[in-house]
Amino acid sequence: MDHWNEIRTAYHVVRLGTVSAAADALGVHRATVIRHIDTLEAALGDKLFQRHARGYTPTEVGQDLLRVAQATDEQFNQLIGRTKGRATDLSGELVVTSLEALAKNLLPALNAFQRQYPKVTIRYITSNRVFKMEYGEAHIAIRSGPKPQDPDNIVQPFSHSEIGLYASPEYVNHNGIPKSPDDYVNHYFVGSDNPSPGAPFHIWMRDNIPQGRFSLRTNSLSILEQAVISGTGIGFMSQKNALTHGLVEVLAPREEWRNIAWLVTHVDLHRTAKVQAFLAILKQHS
């Protein structure tokens, strides 16, 4: 609303009767009150008050404004009451977002939370998009990469993965493994379809693997993982997953390839009961 400050000021003038009283209630200089009224009258194209020695008397337009502002003020106070109630109420909706690759780590916590708090409906969204916490797009976000720097968010370390380059035994049986960087032209790779990848290991692959040697490109991390396991080509994977699937190490994990996940909540929602309950369960399962 473009003129909410001015409307709020005029409402106090109507309610209290004088500019000085309104200025005291709002904690501003009386000149600010007068400027707000002048601005609002210019926007409306009509007078809100009759000025006289005893103070300000609202015109018919001013009375209309009083009714609108009073209703808005009451509705806003009701909203505050409902919001404070929801802050301690474990019901409604909880929106959690992360990259698809982190789903396996989060599902046990999501299941445990749902069992303990059945009145809460969980929306779990996997996406590469950075959700705007300040707009309420998500209650909790798990993000990978550099530590998020938004000052309105509370950021905590969640997990880290050692990332290396791996191939399946089937691939190695048919093609061997690269003996040196010069040998990359004789092998097949699977990689990100993003022309501007954010992950350091995807950037390394873009800069070091010849374009014609990709047997598969995709924006799905789970498909990339399955492609490596099935022998489609050499690709990046966490060391833990690679060991689980018996993959062959082509390049050992490097410090610059380490994938760090961060737990992000907005400062206004961090202390709400739903968020705190989920964070507690998430830490138990991490």
Image (cartoon, rainbow, N blue to C red):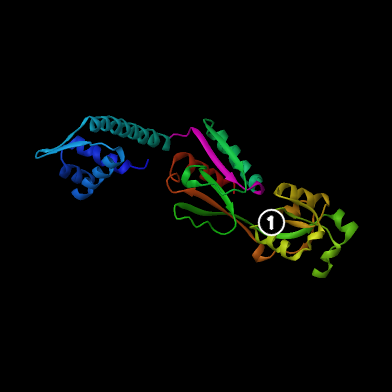
- x%, y% of residue 163? 69, 59
Q: Nearer the viewer, residue 94 or 157?
A: 94
Determine the residue located farthest toward the right in the rendered image. Answer: 174
Image position of 246 with respect to 87: above or below: below
Which of the 4 image quarters holds residue 13? top left
Residue type marked 1: Pro
Decide: few, some or many residues near mark 1? Use Cα within 10 Å; few <14, some 14-19, many ≥20: few
How many marks overall? 1
Image position of 132 with respect to 206: above or below: above
| Left or right of residue 89, residue 194 in this image | right
**In the rendered image, which residue does mark 1 sit on?**
195
Image position of 256 with respect to 67: above or below: below
- x%, y% of residue 84? 38, 37
| Left or right of residue 31, residue 182 in this image | right
| Left or right of residue 185, residue 281 in this image | left
Is 47 contained in the magenta span? no
Q: Nearer the viewer, residue 33 or 175?
A: 33
Question: Which residues make up the magenta segment?
Answer: 89-101
Q: Nearer the viewer, residue 227 or 105?
A: 227
The residue depicted at 47 percent of the width and 44 percent of the height is: 135
- x%, y% of residue 73? 30, 34
- x%, y% of residue 158? 57, 53
Determine the residue located farthest toward the left in the rendered image. Answer: 53
Residue 158 visible from this viewpoint: yes
The residue depicted at 69 percent of the width and 59 percent of the height is: 202
Residue 180 visible from this viewpoint: no
| Quadrant in which the N terminus is drawn | top left
| Left or right of residue 201, residue 53 in this image | left
